[in-house]
Amino acid sequence: MVFSSPAFLFAFLPFTFLLYRLVPGLQAKNLLLTALSLVFYAAGEPVYVLLLLASVAVNYTAGRLLGASRLPAKGVLAAAVAVNLGMLCVFKYADFALGSLYRLLGAGLPLPGLALPIGISFFTFQGLSYVIDAYRNRNLISKSFLKLALYISFFPQLIAGPIVKYHDVSMQIDSRETTPALTADGIRRFILGLSKKLLLSNTVGRMADLAFTASAVQLDARSAWLGALCYMLQIYFDFSGYSDMAIGLGRMFGFQFLENFDHPYASASIKEFWRRWHISLSSWFRDYLYIPLGGNRRGKRRTELNKCLVFFSTGLWHGASWNFVLWGLWHGLFIILEDLLPQKRRPPKALAHLFTLLAVLLGFVLFRADTLPIAGMVYEKMFTGFASTLQSEALLRALLTPFNLFILGVSIISALPILPKMKALASGNSPACALARAGSYAAAGALYVLCALNLAGSQFNPFIYFRF
């Protein structure tokens, strides 16, 4: 992929930003951003840019048809949803569904082997957001193909989110401003996200890889738990880092995207975890699946069934594998158990927090393991692997180098909700607050230098959510 090259990214971003500032008029700026977003996607997926454009065309046409009073709106909506989900199923789930069926029937037939278009889960859900919003509120129907194309293809969040709902960004496409303060804040936010990825996620990710690719002889309880902890940190800094970069870039172009993470590892329940983790996805399923299914309005049993369906869909959205489905159902199970537990019998907050972290960590073993047997082996080692071998001692030494321990400690501290408190303290008008804000930009500059040095001395490591 061309856009996975650091050289391409370092050239594309400043070129796009400078050209955007030079082009006069909002309409011309929108046209420029749309064209360059398509170039960005085509650099990685030359063929599948046509699929992206087809998605825009289908949803644009559906919106215009919804505005035609002679046609049944529910029929138009159903057709648009079917086409969107049909494209997603063909490219993302065909091999998984047919492979599962062939194994069940004992057939050895070939699979289609279609390559997964990058970001298809994200741009499909954004297209669905537009169609459903247009069905619910005809005032949101776009008469401009360009406007919808920019909404679906905007490059900062095209590949790995956050998933932007049409009703949240529609007015910003028509009217927005870029100020020096927003630009500076966006650059700082972008650097923070880049630092999360390069300086933290990649390091703990290499530790997780060592554990999850180890053999049964190499892995013991210590390495298994450490590997699971490292992956728990890796996926958080990887994905929240990308979200920070997308939000920062959005601000540089005048867009205000909603937050996608709110320190989820500070949660005291799984329900709270999902209010803080991948907020754009959980809110999407709430608005467009859970509530249309009836939400909590049709009795307790139906409510719990609706939640199971939502978390089954959440797991399946992440990938065409039973690992992801079980991961989603794992979280759904804990959501239901929390609902069933009487309020007066709930544990103290500190204990609830530890229990939530444990449940999340164990769930991420399913998410990280390449296959169910590997996940089973890791679980077995976590709870029974107390005997050490020469191989397990060697693996543990490879994991616990001084540098790895330092980054692990920094990662754990950085996952705590410390930064928002520091930002709140520096939000006043006093000279001390102004000095603190200036210091934050100086720190961002230092982090950028570290990131540049890191990129120069290492291989490019793509974001985890690129494959979804």
Image (cartoon, grey):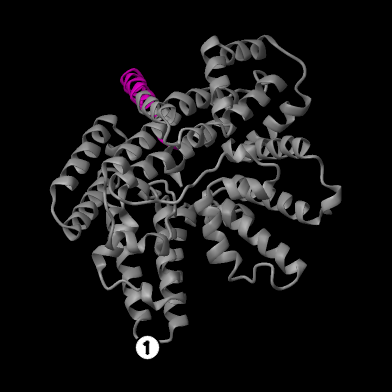
Residue 443 is situated, as x and y percent measured from the top left of the image, at 39, 24
Whether residue 109 is visible = no
Q: Is residue 390 magenta?
A: no
Along the line of sight, which residue is nearer the eye, 146 or 466? 146
- Which corner quadrant of the image does residue 66 belong to? bottom left
Height in image: 63 above or below 169?
below
- Which corner quadrant of the image does residue 447 belong to? top left
Whether residue 125 is visible = yes
Magenta region: 443-463
Residue 46 is situated, as x and y percent measured from the top left of the image, at 25, 48
Q: Residue at x 60, y 65 (%)?
A: 290
The rendered magenta stretch, by its main secondary structure, is classed as helix
Q: Residue at x 34, y 40 (%)?
A: 186
Along the line of sight, which residue is nearer the eye, 234 or 209? 234
Q: Residue furthest bottom?
A: 70
The residue to which callout 1 is attached is 69
Q: Residue furthest front?
A: 430
